[in-house]
Amino acid sequence: MADPEALKLDERPQPAGAEDSLLVSELEQMEAQYEPLLPVEKRLISWSIGLGLVALGLLVWVSYTFFPGTH
């Protein structure tokens, strides 16, 4: 019943050699080139985190103010 030519569960097809070597070289280039964050990126990250914390605080305040019985 079982086909001996069928792939076993732990076997996976391997990518072609050219694609594999291209992927490896791209990953090596990415690891070799460290790029620090730009000042504008740092500001965007800090604004996003700050806005998220303010929104979280606002939602907690609304929850405690308008729905006091559930806490």
Image (spheres, rainbow, N blue to C red):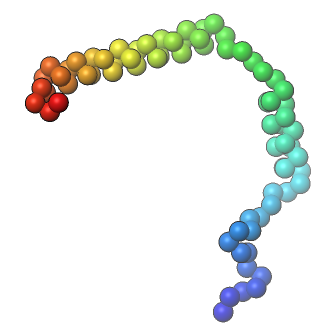
Left-right relation of 51 to 17 = left
Where is residue 63 shown, x and y percent of the image?
20, 25
Where is residue 10 shown, x and y percent of the image?
71, 68
Where is residue 53 shown, x and y percent of the image?
38, 17
Quarter assignment of residue 33: top right
Residue for point 63% across, 7% down: 39
- Identify whether 62 is placed above or below 46: below
Q: Nearer the viewer, residue 19 or 49?
A: 49
Left-right relation of 23 to 38 = right
Quarter assignment of residue 24: top right
Left-right relation of 58 to 38 = left
State which quarter of the image contains the C terminus: top left
Residue lying at the far left in this picture: please name it. 69
Residue for point 46% across, 17% down: 49
Left-right relation of 9 to 27 = left
Residue lying at the far bottom in this picture: please name it. 1
Q: How many marks?
A: 0
Where is residue 56 shown, x and y percent of the image?
33, 21
State which quarter of the image contains the N terminus: bottom right
Residue for point 54% across, 15% down: 45
Residue for point 22% across, 18% down: 61
Q: Nearer the viewer, residue 9 or 17?
A: 9
- Identify whether 40 is placed above or below 22: above
